[in-house]
Structures are given as structure tokens and as C-alpha cells.
Image (cartoon, rainbow, N blue to C red):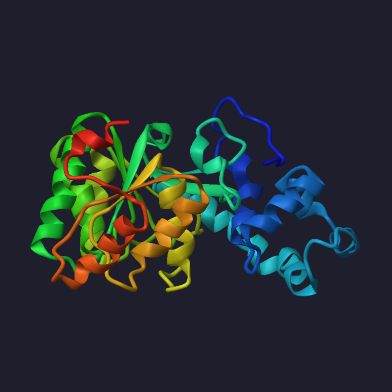
């Protein structure tokens, strides 16, 4: 894969990142088209300075997106974002930065920027994603905590999505081992979803982990955001551990992304009479690696 890239050796200040922040605010502009615009113009600042004719001549975006790029209301939001990010100790890491997760940069539709609250140094730790049902069983809860705890105890970063159920228990397991964990959100970092995980998110940050998102402040946890979020969960990981998954589970979306990204799929077998095991047991039949203890994941 080839893409426009140069490496910055150290983090820029928020003010120096103002055009990257602006680029993240533009609606209707996905990762691939952002990549192509950056290839064409060379930097977010040059995109910001471009006029309608220059944007049209790229043949990358249509008139609707060009209107969004030139919209003054979006540009006026930069000042608020700079103020909020500074006051709340939220950083922005761009794909050209050394601190950006190196594995994530390898995927086809890598996010151009990530907002990060917490320890930026964990983004490049060797990690395993743990995913599974929101509607969990006691068995699933115990497995998620067991693997989260023991992998984190062995210096493996636990990556998940802070959702109810298996995601939360994997984070909790890692924290129980005084390990590091990253939660990838499907909304802006000015809020936590679900609300009952506000304290868990605070604990992740206070214990040396991080909560991250590609979405700018004010982005609501819309249903459409979560599949995109899942590509980051798998993309940052060396492998994905599936704890519980129903027959038609959102968890399987993460598995699909992981397979596209060339990641290993590990699956915990489940009770054949449990609806939460239909998806996991099918993955094993299809060739995913069955695991029953954390030592099998120490890669």
C-alpha cells in the first residue's frame, strides 16, 4: 500500500494542529477522500487555503463536500475546539506523527487523526483486542476479565470499545492487573457512551491508559459510527479475541475488519445451548483459532 506520509519526530502543539482539527470537523468527508486530498495538496493548511476552483479541479470531492470544506461555520469552530482540548488535556495525533499507532497506519482506511485523552505512549504498545456481546452471560464476563487481567499482567495492551458487557469487562480485567488498556469511542471525547461507563473511562485514563476517537468534539454516539469505530479496535491490534457473539452480532463486524486487515482471530468456545455462543462457535468452525487460556495469546 502506498500513501502520502512523512514522520514528525515529536508532537506539535494544539495551535500547530489547528488545521488538522479543522479537517476532522468537515462533515461528509471520509478517511479515503481525506487521504487523497492530502496527497493532492500536501497539508491540511493548503486544503484550508484552497478555493472552489482548486478543489473542483482535483476531481476528488463533489460540490456538496466542497461546500462543507469552504463553510465558514466549520472554520469558526476551531477556536472552541482548541480551547476545550487544552482545558481537558485532550491531544490530537495525526497519521504523520511518530506517536500514531503504527499498525493502524497500515490499514486501508486509517483515520487521519485521533483524539486522545490519557497516555499517548500506549498507542504503540503490543496489543490484543477483546470484543463480544453487550448482552453477556456470567461465563462471558468471567472470560473477559480473565483474559483482560492475565494479558495485561504480561504487558499486553488491551484494546476494546467501552461498550456494555464484554468490552467493559475486558477493560476492568486489565485495570485489575494494573495494566494498560485503550477504549476506542464512537463519539467525541467530550462525552462518554454509555453513560454508566463514565467512571470506568476516568479510571482507564488515571491508570495510564487512554480513551481515543477519530470523531471531533460534539459527535454523538450514532449507530453508524460504531462499525467505523470497530475498524480502529482491530486495526490497532495484533489479534482479536472474541469472547461471546450471537448469530447476528455487531462483534462479527469487528471480525470482518480484522480479517481484511490480516489480523489473527482467536475465539473462546461457548456452550452449544447458549445464544451468545452461536457466532463464536461458528467462527471456530470457519477456521478461527480456539483458545482456552491466556498463554496461547502471548505473542
Residue at figure coordinates x 80%, y 47% from the top left:
41
Who is closer to the viewer here, 222 or 50?
Answer: 222
Question: Does any portion of residue 218 appear in the rendered image?
Answer: no
Residue at figure coordinates x 61%, y 43% from the top left:
17
Who is closer to the viewer here, 100 or 136?
Answer: 136
Question: Does any portion of residue 52 appear in the rendered image?
Answer: yes
- On the image, the x and y values in percent for residue 279 come to 29, 66
Within the image, what quadrant is residue 66 found in? bottom right
On the picture, is 150 further left or further right than 267?
Answer: left
Residue at figure coordinates x 20%, y 33% from the top left:
295
On the picture, is 45 further left or further right than 91?
Answer: right
Within the image, what quadrant is residue 254 found in? bottom left
Total numbered circles? 0
- On the image, the x and y values in percent for residue 235 come to 47, 47
Q: Is residue 265 above or below residue 96?
A: below
Q: Is residue 262 above or below residue 186?
A: above
Quadrant location, the C terminus: top left
Within the image, what quadrant is residue 280 found in? bottom left
Q: Is residue 218 above or below residue 233?
A: below
Quadrant location, the N terminus: top right
Who is closer to the viewer here, 47 or 37?
Answer: 37
Residue furthest to the top: 9
- On the image, the x and y values in percent for residue 6 come to 68, 32
Q: Is residue 255 above or below residue 89?
A: below
- On the image, the x and y values in percent for residue 192 come to 32, 61
Residue at figure coordinates x 74%, y 52% from the top left:
36
Amino acid at each position: 500500500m502506498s500513501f502520502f506520509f512523512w514522520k514528525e519526530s515529536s508532537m506539535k502543539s494544539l495551535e500547530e494542529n489547528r488545521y488538522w482539527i479543522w479537517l476532522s470537523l468537515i462533515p461528509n468527508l471520509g478517511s479515503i477522500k481525506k487521504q487523497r486530498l492530502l496527497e493532492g495538496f500536501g497539508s491540511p493548511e493548503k486544503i484550508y487555503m484552497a478555493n472552489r476552483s482548486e478543489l473542483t479541479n482535483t476531481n476528488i470531492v463533489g460540490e456538496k463536500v466542497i461546500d462543507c470544506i469552504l463553510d465558514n461555520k466549520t472554520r469558526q469552530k476551531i477556536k472552541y475546539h482548541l480551547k476545550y482540548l487544552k482545558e481537558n488535556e485532550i491531544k490530537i495525533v495525526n497519521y504523520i506523527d511518530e506517536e500514531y499507532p503504527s499498525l493502524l497506519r497500515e490499514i486501508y482506511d486509517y483515520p487521519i487523526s485521533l483524539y486522545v485523552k490519557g497516555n499517548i505512549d500506549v498507542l504503540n504498545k503490543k496489543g490484543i483486542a477483546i470484543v463480544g456481546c453487550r448482552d453477556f452471560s456470567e461465563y462471558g464476563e468471567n472470560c473477559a476479565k480473565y483474559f483482560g487481567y492475565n494479558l495485561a499482567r504480561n504487558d499486553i495492551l488491551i484494546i476494546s470499545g467501552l461498550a456494555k458487557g464484554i468490552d467493559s469487562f475486558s477493560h476492568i480485567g486489565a485495570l485489575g492487573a494494573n495494566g494498560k488498556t485503550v477504549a476506542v469511542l464512537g463519539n467525541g471525547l467530550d462525552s462518554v457512551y454509555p453513560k454508566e461507563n463514565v467512571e470506568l473511562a476516568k479510571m482507564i485514563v488515571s491508570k495510564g491508559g487512554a480513551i481515543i476517537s477519530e470523531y471531533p468534539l460534539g459527535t454523538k454516539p450514532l449507530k453508524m459510527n460504531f462499525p467505523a469505530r470497530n475498524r480502529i479496535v482491530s486495526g490497532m491490534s495484533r489479534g482479536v479475541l472474541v469472547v461471546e457473539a450471537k448469530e447476528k452480532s455487531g462483534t462479527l463486524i469487528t471480525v470482518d475488519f480484522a480479517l481484511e486487515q490480516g489480523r489473527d482471530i482467536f475465539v473462546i468456545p461457548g456452550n452449544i445451548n447458549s445464544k451468545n455462543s452461536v457466532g463464536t462457535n461458528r467462527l471456530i468452525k470457519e477456521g478461527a483459532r480456539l483458545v482456552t487460556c491466556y498463554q496461547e495469546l502471548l505473542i
